[in-house]
Image (cartoon, rainbow, N blue to C red):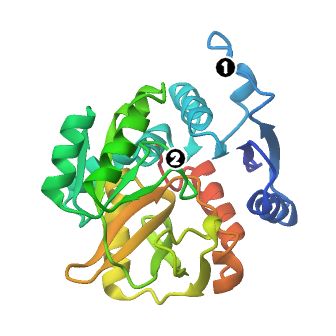
Amino acid sequence: MNHQPHIGVLYSRVRVEEKWIFAALEQRGVEYDRLDDREVFFDLQNPEPWLKYDVILERSISYARGLYSTRVLNAWGIPTVNTADVAEACGNKLTTATALSQAGVPQPHTVAAYTPKSALEAIEKIGYPVVLKPMVGSWGRLLAKINDRDAAEAILEHKSVLGSYEHSIFYIQEFIDKPDRDIRALVIGEEPITAIYRKSPHWITNTARGGEGEICPLTPQLTAICREAARAVGGGLLAVDVIEHPEHGYQVNEINHTMEFHTTAPTTGIDIPNLIVDYLLAVARHEIEVL
């Protein structure tokens, strides 16, 4: 008798993506449990309650909850999508940039500094304008476009006194004058499956900030850079954000390891939830090794 995979879905809130994933699992008769990260706990001396899962899909909104959960589960030998290593590589922008740099994947000019003085020196070396980003964050929040020295001094001082140590690690990127859009490509394993333009007259093009989706063709060049980016961070279910540099072409801006697809799915018509279920079942059946 064949073993039927048992899947867990760790989540924070049932958003539209989770509704679609749950529906796909149910329509296909897959045995699964909904695991609310506000209610679960991990007894490090007793992994037994978790050993029934052949794979756990991590959909936590909180980067920390998702990372720590997958770190414990992976230590117990339970496959997760994505793995703790992938979450760590993608959830921290400097770690992402380091992985991309090591793999030779094109990305915007990026600098890290630890004091307002050194950050100001780095900014002036890059040249205005620049973009200041939080090390951990999503949805286009807490991004600052800095156009001159006065703005740089004010923002760096404000961040340095906010209290969190992360605000005192300054992640600085060159500002790229992109054509009122960026590209979000969805990758499963290491293979891009679809992509959209996120269009906005504002320099922040995230759909969470009002950007509109439009189908983007997966050209050979775009496919290649997305494969390279996915490979650099360990593969899995990923959203690769790509910028079109006016002089240097495609550059990878960020990689999201708990990808949202509420705009991509209806825009492209791709059945992303069922493709996710296909991937989960392949991992559960050991057709794909993720650990």
Looking at the rendered structure, the kind of residue marked 1 is: Pro
Q: Quadrant of residue 253?
A: bottom left
Kindly identify the residue that appears in the image at 74 percent across and 62 percent down.
17
Looking at the rendered structure, the kind of residue marked 2 is: Gly
Lateral position of residue 60 relative to residue 229, left or right: right
Badge 2: few (under 14), some or many (20 or more) residues near its Cα, within 10 Å?
Answer: some
Q: Position of residue 213 (x, y in %)?
A: 61, 81
Q: Is residue 39 visible?
A: yes
Q: Quadrant of residue 175?
A: bottom left
Secondary structure category for the residue under label 2? loop
Q: Position of residue 135 (x, y in %)?
A: 41, 42
Question: What residue is shown with label 1?
Answer: 47
User: Front-most of 120 and 244?
Assistant: 120
Q: Work out whether mark 2 precedes mark 1 in sequence or the reverse, and give the earlier one.
A: 1
224 lies above or below 164: below
User: Front-most of 78 and 260?
Assistant: 260
Q: Position of residue 74 (x, y in %)?
A: 53, 32
Report the residue that reaches farthest toward the front.
Answer: 150
Kindly identify the residue that appears in the image at 52 percent across and 30 percent down.
71
Residue depth check, mark 2 versus mark 1: number of the one nearer the observer: 2
Lateral position of residue 222 relative to residue 69, left or right: left
Q: Which mark is residue 243?
A: none
Q: Position of residue 83 (x, y in %)?
A: 50, 42
Report the residue that reaches farthest toward the left.
Answer: 125
Question: What residue is shown with label 2?
Answer: 137
The CA distance from mark 2 to mark 1 is 30 Å
